[in-house]
């Protein structure tokens, strides 16, 4: 039996993975759980201007420690890639593999706001000032290929996220991880010359990574749940 811990993306929560992916992994006979990060989902009442990337890394570190989880397949979607990278730096001895689901893959000193250029950082800060009291970022629109019934269910549950989680640089004390890593690229809707496509090509060419490509949109937990479960199960013997 494998142990999967899933870290959701921006504006989400464990709820966004507990509908299809966690049940699918459990039905296959594995321990699977999703973590809700501070200030989001059922923990949205804890949102404050002080919540940052370190807070979210500590959320997952605490789950691993207090639940005494080991040999974990740690999965991050989108913004969750920032979090699992930080967790791998702090607690690699409890992890078996990292899986990045169309996720951020930061280097030391990088914030997710910097991944797609300085214009993106300015855009996020300005939007927080306009729409989030200066300290939080409201969710944007969902993906074009998200099934309408899932959009109707998810939209009321999505929550503004503290801005510092996007702007705080990650600090890695161990250098680049040596843990086995898989990157799943959701290609639908991404231009061939986009920064996301360029990142995917770099990872695909890097022998340290296992690379998987899906012709689906960014929210693969909604648009391709069966394929997502299969990909995660494939990691057990990778």
Image (tube, grey):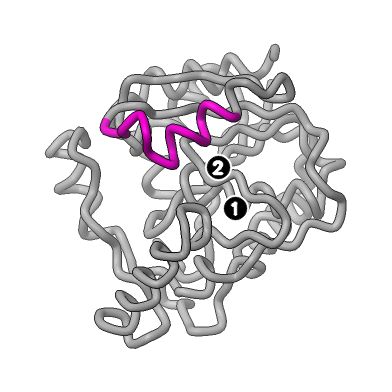
List the residue tagged with mark 1. 82
Q: Is residue 42 visible?
A: no
**Considering only order in the chain, which callout, 1 or 2, is on the residue closer to the N terminus?**
2
Residues at marks 2 and 1, CA–CA distance in whole angstroms: 8 Å
Q: Which residues are drawn in magenta? A: 189-202
State the residue at coordinates (51%, 41%).
Answer: 103
Q: Quadrant of residue 41?
A: bottom left
The percent coordinates of residue 128 (x first, y second) are 34, 78
- Rate crowding at label 1 as few (under 14), some (14 to 19) or many (20 or more) other CA atoms within 10 Å: many
Which one is in front, 96 or 214? 214
Is residue 69 toward the left or the right of residue 42 in the image? Answer: right
State the residue at coordinates (35%, 37%).
Answer: 218
- Circle 1 sits in a helix, a strand or a loop, which is it? helix
The reply to whether dot 2 and dot 1 touch (C-beta < 8 Å) is: yes
Q: Quadrant of residue 124?
A: bottom left
Which one is in front, 104 or 116? 116
List the residue tagged with mark 2. 76
Which quadrant would the N terminus be assigned to in this image?
A: top right
Q: Quadrant of residue 194?
A: top left
Is residue 84 toward the left or the right of residue 126 in the image? Answer: right
The percent coordinates of residue 202 (x first, y second) are 58, 29
Q: Is residue 12 above or below residue 225?
A: below
């Amino acid at each position: 039996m494998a142990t999967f811990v899933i870290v959701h993306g921006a504006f989400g929560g464990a709820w966004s993975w507990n509908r299809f992916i966690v049940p699918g992994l459990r039905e296959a006979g594995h321990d699977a759980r999703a973590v809700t990060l501070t200030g989001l989902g059922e923990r949205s009442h804890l949102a404050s201007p002080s919540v940052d990337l370190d807070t979210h890394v500590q959320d997952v570190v605490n789950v691993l420690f207090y639940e005494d989880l080991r040999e974990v397949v740690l999965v991050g979607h989108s913004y969750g890639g920032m979090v699992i990278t930080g967790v791998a730096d702090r607690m690699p001895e409890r992890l078996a593999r990292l899986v990045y689901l169309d996720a951020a893959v930061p280097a030391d000193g990088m914030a997710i706001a910097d991944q797609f250029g300085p214009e993106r950082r300015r855009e996020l800060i300005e939007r927080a000032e306009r729409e989030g009291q200066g300290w939080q970022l409201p969710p944007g629109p969902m993906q074009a290929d998200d099934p309408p019934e899932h959009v109707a269910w998810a939209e009321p549950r999505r929550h503004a996220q503290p801005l510092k989680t996007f702007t705080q640089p990650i600090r890695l004390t161990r250098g680049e991880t040596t843990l086995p890593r898989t990157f799943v690229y959701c290609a639908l809707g991404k231009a061939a010359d986009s920064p996301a496509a360029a990142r995917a090509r770099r990872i695909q060419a890097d022998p340290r990574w296992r690379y998987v490509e899906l012709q689906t949109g960014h929210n693969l937990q909604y648009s391709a749940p069966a394929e997502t479960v299969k990909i995660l199960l494939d990691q057990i013997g990778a």
